[in-house]
Image (spheres, rainbow, N blue to C red):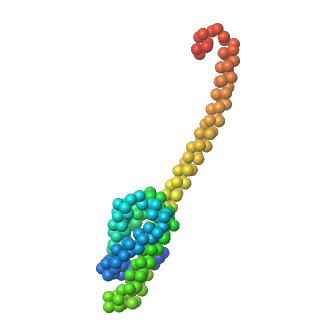
Amino acid sequence: MLDELVRYVGFGDEDAELLAEARPLVEPSFQEVVDAFYAAIEANARARAVFESEAQISRHKRSLRNWLESLFGGVYDTAYFEARASIGYAHVRIDLDPSLMIAAMSVVRDRLSFIVGELEDAILPAERREKLARAVHRICDIDLAIMLETYRDDYMARVRGAERLAALGQVAGTIGHELRNPLAVMETSIHLLRTRLKGDERAARH
């Protein structure tokens, strides 16, 4: 899936090199991105309700910081894909609405674009800044697609589970129908035997 996404968004070696090159330039502003991200969460009741405690928020802030560091890591391989997928599955486990995840990515993308745009020419020429901004958008698109895929996986697993339950219900219904007919005959036969063999204790036991 990662290879397909990379081709689809046009993410190439130059993008990877630009992101790795820019890391020391944008890393001092990572805290600004983290703060903007959690300010948006605080402003949204549904997003805020996902977090149970301040300790949990602190852990997630550290995770976001690590995520930003790997976003500009320059290496986008299978391990990168798996790390992003694990974030998506964590979102599924806490029942985070995917629309909130998309909105959160938008916040991160906007802040990173602003930070890149504010770099001075002496640090990074305008042409390189434009290319870097495109690289940021492309890698954010890839990350978001990977995490959203985990929601699709979860949905398909739920569908398969529902289908198995439905099939089990059909089998149980068929078995019940097949058993009802002979049981009804047996019940009637027992009733007739009881009425005709009154007084015979051995017959009653049988």
- Quarter of the rendering occupied by the N terminus: bottom left
Which residue corresponds to the image point at 41% horizontal and 58% vertical from the top-left? 52
Q: Residue furthest top?
A: 199
- Quarter of the rendering occupied by the C terminus: top right
- Relative to 189, does residue 116 appear above or below in the rendering? below
Describe residue 92's horizontal placement relative to residue 119 as left or right: right
Q: Position of residue 29 (x, y in %)?
A: 34, 78
Q: How many numbered tags mark residues here?
A: 0
- Relative to 177, does residue 65 appear above or below in the rendering? below
Foreground pick, 136 / 178: 136
Q: Quadrant of the rendered structure where residue 178 is?
A: top right
Describe residue 171's horizontal placement relative to residue 112 as left or right: right
Q: Position of residue 8 (x, y in %)?
A: 48, 75
Can residue 150 be seen here? The reply is no
Foreground pick, 69 / 14: 69
Which residue corresponds to the image point at 36% horizontal and 86% vertical from the top-left? 119
Which residue corresponds to the image point at 53% horizontal and 50% vertical from the top-left? 161
Can residue 97 be seen here? The reply is yes
Foreground pick, 115 / 88: 115
- Relative to 202, does residue 139 appear above or below in the rendering? below
Q: Residue furthest left?
A: 24
Which residue corresponds to the image point at 61% horizontal and 12% vertical from the top-left? 203
Q: Position of residue 67 (x, y in %)?
A: 36, 69
Q: Quadrant of the rendered structure where residue 56 is?
A: bottom left
Q: Position of residue 25 (x, y in %)?
A: 32, 81
